[in-house]
Amino acid sequence: MAKSVLVIGGGPAGLGAARILGKLGIPTILVEKEDRLGGNPILNHYHTLIPRKLKPEQVLGPYIKEVESNPNVQVKLKTELTACEGEPGSYKVTLSNGETHEVGAIVVAKGFEHFDPRRKGELGYGLYPDVITNLELEQMFSREGRLYRPSNGQLPKRVAFVFCVGSRDRQLGVTNVHCCRYGCALSGLQAMEIKQHYPDVDVFCYYMDVRTYGTWEYPFYWAPQEQYGVRYVRGRIAGITYSPADGRLRVKHEDTIVQRPAEVPMDLVVLVLGMEPSAGTKKVAKILGLAQDPDSKFLVPSEESGSNIISNKPGIFIAGACKGPIDIESSLAEGEAAGAEAAAFVGAKVTV
Amino acid sequence: MGVIGKRVAYYPGCSLEGATRAYDVSTRIVARELGLELDYLEDYNCCGAMESKNVTFMGTLLLNARNMSLARKQGHDVIVAPCNGCSFSLQRAEYFLQTDSKIFERVNSLLKEGGVDLLDKIPETYHILEWFYHEAGPQKVKEKTKRPLRGLKVANYYGCLYTRPHFYARTYSHAGGQSEEARPRRRETADDDEHPYYMNALFEAAGATSVEFEPMHTQ
Amino acid sequence: MDVSGDWNLIILPRVINDYDLDFAKEVMSLPEGKTMIQCYQCSYCTASCPVHNYWDERYNSRHFIHLARLGLIDELQKRADVMWRCVSCHKCTHRCPKGVLVEEVLKAILKTMAKKGLIDEYPSKKFDKFFTESVLEYGRIEDGELLFGWIEKQGYNVVKDPILKKPIPFLGETPEWLKQLVMKPIKSMNISFLVLNAKHMLFHPRTKNWNKFKQVLRKVVQEEGGLT
């Protein structure tokens, strides 16, 4: 019988891996530090996912169900990896609940964390209630189903999206110079959702570049402008202030096209947060000796491999946002690829 | 060849009956010699050119819709205009009439008010070069040439509006550009938009020599 | 003490304090201004524009669209002296990757500015109105009459025939550029064409059955406020 496989992380990538391993008949241990599966999209109550505009439950629900009901997969919640010894092909792993297991391969899918906007003090997050994060906007949609200003509960007349908060920013150190990859597209989607429900709200996106790459260009950049009249203004927001006179915020920036400074009133400002490797990713990288990007600390694939799910350690595969910003459908696909690779590594014989 | 029609409505435009009378005379002769028929648009009015379009949107549309209506009355689906400005104006009107049903309805009701026949169908407008090229073509021009323009050096100047903008007319429905049909597409009979050659080809067929003139010939 | 006077600059308002979003709404409510919303500021239009390239870089179609979309009226007004300089070559509209009818949009912006009293009557509009008046009146234009009528309007002392009171070409004051422009083709012109042109100048070609249609046209133009 084939050796078992350990999957670390119960988010999209981990679910993808565990699902395919279970299907292939490989004994699989899925460890998740939180008390439920699903990762960030489920735990943080995302509203609509890019690029296919599905709900997190629609996308991840079937995966969770399949993983939980597959007898080959043991799901261990509130559990983390604490130590690992041994050779490729027979790793002895210790978990936080005291158990030890011998596994043939490991899939690492420890994911990312949202940037903490308090680190950008000039944006006034935490100081002004009407400065919120795009995550909070998602939760406003998913939990309350309406748009409002936290300061007074009323509908804002104007909403500003501030791109690249915690991304592409050397002031935060070398750790945050990368692009978050999802922010432009998600902002386009959120802006469209606002306009769909509140056509009279004016929405502004303050950008440096708009990186709705590939096929995302039309649905998340052109459509917000052409169909919903969302306005894009080129210029990074350098500060957010509050005017007690009218109770509105001022977004301070240079309109780089006009080449003039601007302080424009806004009712609600949404900070588009960057992605950072999660604490768990960094911890697991240390335990397993995985290569990390010296700057961002995201995991990096093996230099010899063309595929980005192969780590520098034989028998250890990496998938999803632990190795850099990624969207959810790609995360699932990477997880499945990593799961299949792990199955092949432990000697699964699959007949067609 | 032969995609536009051998018998078309002929809209000369104001200038061809005034300062550029010579162009009108030669156009008619050339068409006749090539076995094509130009049916003079009786009692036409000015296309409005750039000037009236800058002043009034609906007025300019009406001016052109009246000419279209006359062409329909004379039984034509196709209008040919030898003037760049006129063919532009008609094509522009065609574009707005075809892409916006509200505008079309308004124009029709105003035509009625002005005592002009309603537009049952929007005729298509072609530039005379396009028409000559597709209905006769260089080969026919060569055959019919009696005194070749041997030794005549020609700088073929096409002007601004001969090829631009390429999607005014029957290929583009705008309204935000969402659907597949909404993408700008070139009219199939249109000349190459950035490097037109119909006039070069026709003149060379008549024995003249085209001189190198790019990129000025569409400036 | 600052004697350069530069310190005065500091009190000029440079900060954009707000947008005038109604302006953009009004531009886009015009049929020719609708596509303004599609612009993504790539500047393909401006790079193609002969006015920008060969005349004045302050004429920048992409920039005008940006300003109009945000309603930065003061910036638009700063460029009022160049905004009407479009030569309608349509390179912008032809090449725009987003399908913006750039030439039409710019005219829509100008129209909106004029309507809101944000721009004085600009030189090109004077001619546009003069031309359109002639079209409305006769149904057709006559090149010679248009040209010399315009020259008369510019303050040149033209000679008119005593009966019909129409300007007679080249008899009175004529701008030098026009003499040079016209003399060469006229010399090589068939005499019968010259006679015809002279006849047209005296007896303006008219569209028959025009009167009823003219009324409708005038009504429409008046509604749009084009000739005011």
Image (cartoon, coloured by chain):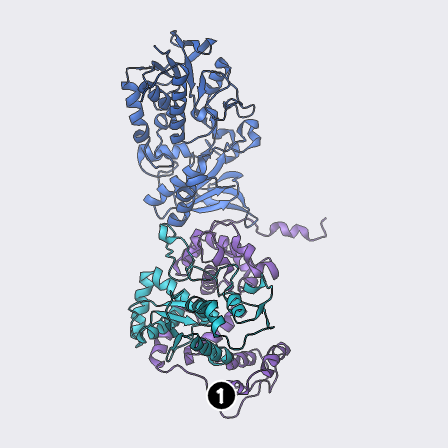
Q: Position of residue A6 (x, y in %)?
A: 39, 14
- Disc 1 element: helix
**Chain B's shade in the image?**
cyan
- Name the residue tied to disc 1: C199
Chain ID, purple in image: C
Residue situated in front as seen by the camera: A337 or C126 = A337
The location of residue C206, given as percent across then percent down, is: 41, 83
Query: Disc 1 is attached to a residue of which chain?
Result: C
Q: Nearer the viewer, residue A252 or A241?
A: A252
Query: On the rendered image, what quadrant is the C terminus of chain A found in?
Result: top left
- State the residue lying farthest toward the front: B143
Give the mark count: 1
Q: Colour of chain A?
A: blue
Pick the quarter of the image with the N terminus of chain A.
top left
Judge whether C159 appears above or below A346 on screen: below
Q: Is residue C68 visible?
A: yes
Dividing the picture into quarters, in which one does residue B130 lie? bottom left
Q: Is residue A172 above or below residue B109?
A: above
Q: Position of residue A64 (x, y in %)?
A: 31, 23
Residue placed furthest toward the bottom: C163
Residue type at tag 1: Lys
